[in-house]
């Protein structure tokens, strides 16, 4: 009998765990190494989601293990008013990778970094309205949750005052079309900001966006969109915040996804990938914005702000990404994966679209090519069968999670 059918384990899980989303996978994970996790039967399962989209270097990378061991033995945690060498080194390394974003705040999670970014934007602009995409995911806390529109909006009371959403561009289901039927994202963006202007009370502080909306269905902002979005923001005195929790640190074939477009945000948030599976996040911005925020009393004390242990891990992550040429690797392997998925699209009508960039890709499962109606039931069956065969992947079905 499979060791995954441990009645005592599952009984304790049902009795003592608070459920926070969908159902758990029917396996007890005992260990992880490289691109695989291993269940109680020691069966290897290919981890196509890199943990929670975070294990950029795979599981148990020896360099990360060595860094954690060394740093725990040296200094892991400090009072928030103290500084250590790993914190300053990581901030310096990040600034070198993103010219124009010279200052960094090191935190623990993506939601936390987005909270800090939005808080900073409100303080610097003196305004409070935050605009986001209709299929966004920026976190489950406070204003980050208020800027999350893909799921979890019902039953929790009012969102933060000044929360505004616009439609996310979708090339597979274009709302505005050119003569050839393709997405007219420029017209859609003009229309969206006309709606923003009509809803605003005159206090637009920032727009927060993911370059590729993962939880929203792997929707990529088309080339040119980001530059136009930043222009729309600056015309209104807004700051542009980019949330690169999943796209950052090489996954898309560039160190940061915004670099493809040559557009630098006013504020950049990083998480997930920068810690390679350990809790590390960062907020990056220009010296000018940081100076203004500091002069106005910017406050963001948290328990683990500027902790040495995760900062040391972040430095090691950047070392490995550079030494193993993982940015280029994501670009080349991403093309191979995209081509393979595209072949499946040609063979099976249920594969409606293949989209994404680098190694951040997705397929949309549909009922038929004419209606393009999503087939959630088939998608769930595919995911379950893949897991049975040893492949773990995520299916986006967020309406079932309270969206």
Image: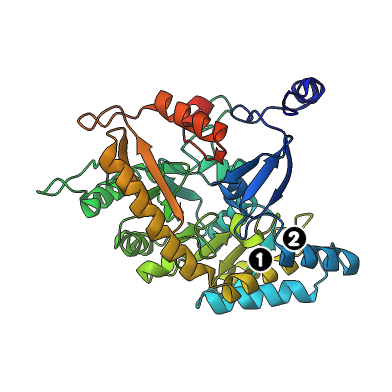
Image coordinates for residue 364, horizontal then vertical, percent: 36, 38
How much space separates mark 2 and mark 1, taking CA atoms? 8 Å
Image coordinates for residue 91, horizontal then vertical, percent: 65, 73
Give residue 259's quadrant in the image: bottom left
Closer to the chain start, of discs 2 and 1, is 1
Give residue 371's quadrant in the image: top left
- Give the crowd class for mark 2: few <14, some 14-19, many >=20 residues within 10 Å: many
The outermost residue toward the left is: 179
Q: Nearer the viewer, residue 8 or 72?
A: 8
Do the residues under discs 2 and 1 have CB atoms within 8 angstroms? yes
- The tag on residue 105 is 1
- Identity of the residue drawn at 62% across and 77% down: 93
Q: How many dots with numbers?
A: 2
Give residue 277's quadrant in the image: bottom right
Q: Is residue 9 above or below residue 46?
A: above
Q: Is residue 83 above or below residue 384?
A: below
Res. 89 in view: yes
The outermost residue toward the right is: 73
- Identity of the residue drawn at 50% across and 60% down: 251
Q: Is residue 35 above or below residue 21?
A: below
Image coordinates for residue 146, horizontal then vertical, percent: 53, 40
Q: Is residue 199 left or right of residue 94?
A: left
- The tag on residue 123 is none
Where does label 2 land, which residue? 305
């Amino acid at each position: 009998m499979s060791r995954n059918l441990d009645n005592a384990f599952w009984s304790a899980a049902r009795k003592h765990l608070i459920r926070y989303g969908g159902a758990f996978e029917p396996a007890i994970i005992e260990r992880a190494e490289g691109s695989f996790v291993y269940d109680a039967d020691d069966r290897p399962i290919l981890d196509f989601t890199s943990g929670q989209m975070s294990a950029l270097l795979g599981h148990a990378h020896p360099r990360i293990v060595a860094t954690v061991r060394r740093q725990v033995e040296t200094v892991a945690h400090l009072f928030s008013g103290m500084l250590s060498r790993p914190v300053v080194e990581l901030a310096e390394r990040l600034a070198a990778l993103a010219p124009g974003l010279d200052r960094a705040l090191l935190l623990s999670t993506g939601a936390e970094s987005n909270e800090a970014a939005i808080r900073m934007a409100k303080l610097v602009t003196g305004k409070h309205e935050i605009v986001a995409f209709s299929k966004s995911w920026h976190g489950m806390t406070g204003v980050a949750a208020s800027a999350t529109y893909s799921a979890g909006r019902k039953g929790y009371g009012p969102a933060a005052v000044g929360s505004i959403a616009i439609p996310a561009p979708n090339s597979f289901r274009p709302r505005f079309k050119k003569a050839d039927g393709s997405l007219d994202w420029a017209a859609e963006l003009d229309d969206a900001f006309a709606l923003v202007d009509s809803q605003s009370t005159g206090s637009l502080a920032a727009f927060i966006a993911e370059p590729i909306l993962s939880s929203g269905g792997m929707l990529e902002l088309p080339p040119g969109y980001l530059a136009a979005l930043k222009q729309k923001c600056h015309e209104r005195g807004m700051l542009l915040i980019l949330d690169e929790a999943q796209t950052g640190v090489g996954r898309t074939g560039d160190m940061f996804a915004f670099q493809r477009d040559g557009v630098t945000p006013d504020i950049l948030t990083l998480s997930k990938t920068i810690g390679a599976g350990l809790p590390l996040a960062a907020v990056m911005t220009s010296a000018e914005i940081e100076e203004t925020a500091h002069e106005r009393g910017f406050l963001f004390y948290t328990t683990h702000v500027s902790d040495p242990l995760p900062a040391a891990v972040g430095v090691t992550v950047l070392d490995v990404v550079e030494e193993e040429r993982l940015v280029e690797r994501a670009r080349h392997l991403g093309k191979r994966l995209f081509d393979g998925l595209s072949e499946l699209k040609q063979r099976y009508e249920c594969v409606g679209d293949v989209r994404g960039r680098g190694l951040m890709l997705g397929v949309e499962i549909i009922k038929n090519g004419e209606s393009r109606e999503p087939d959630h039931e088939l998608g769930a069956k595919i995911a379950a069968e893949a897991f049975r065969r040893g492949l773990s992947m995520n299916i986006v079905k967020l309406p079932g999670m309270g969206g």
